[in-house]
Amino acid sequence: MTNVLPYRSTPVFDQDTLPAALRARHDTKAGVWGVIRVLEGKLELTIFDPPSTTLLTPGAPGLVRPQQPHFVTPMGMVKMQVDFYDRPPAA
């Protein structure tokens, strides 16, 4: 299996520059998977369907499936980035 590469990535955000839109309920578009990568610190990922809350760290990214409602909450100082894919990324 070949590696799936992201077609786009956000800038690196920290606890001060993380956009309000990512802190509030939103979802990815149809056919778009998002991988939330924490570069430093911790970030809480809340998913509405199915309901779950996960603590993301540099060694534990979060996966958001197409059209899955979610939001993130910084847990103190954090640096993070989101990679977007047009097919399921490798585990």
Image (cartoon, rainbow, N blue to C red):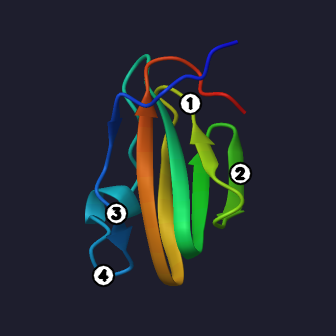
**C-alpha distance separating marks 4 and 2:** 25 Å
Q: Is residue 37 above or below residue 41?
A: above
**C-alpha distance separating marks 4 and 3:** 11 Å
Crowd rating for badge 3 (residues with CA inside 10 Å; few <14, some 14–19, many 20+): some
Q: Which residue is mark 3?
A: 12
x 36%, y 57%: residue: 22
**x and y percent of residue 41 in the render?**
58, 79
The mark nearer the N terminus, 4 or 2, is 4
Q: Which residue is mark 1?
A: 65
Q: Amino acid at mark 2?
A: Ser
Q: Is residue 2 above or below residue 45?
A: above
Quadrant of the image for the C terminus?
top right
Left or right, 90 with respect to 12, comes to right
Observer-nearest of 5 and 24:
5
The mark nearer the N terminus, 1 or 2, is 2
Observer-nearest of 56 and 49:
56
Mark 3, secondary structure of its residue: loop
**C-alpha distance separating marks 3 and 1:** 21 Å
Crowd rating for badge 1 (residues with CA inside 10 Å; few <14, some 14–19, many 20+): many
**x and y percent of residue 19 in the render?**
27, 64
Q: Which residue is mark 2?
A: 52
Quadrant of the image for the N terminus?
top right
Q: Which mark is residue 16?
A: 4
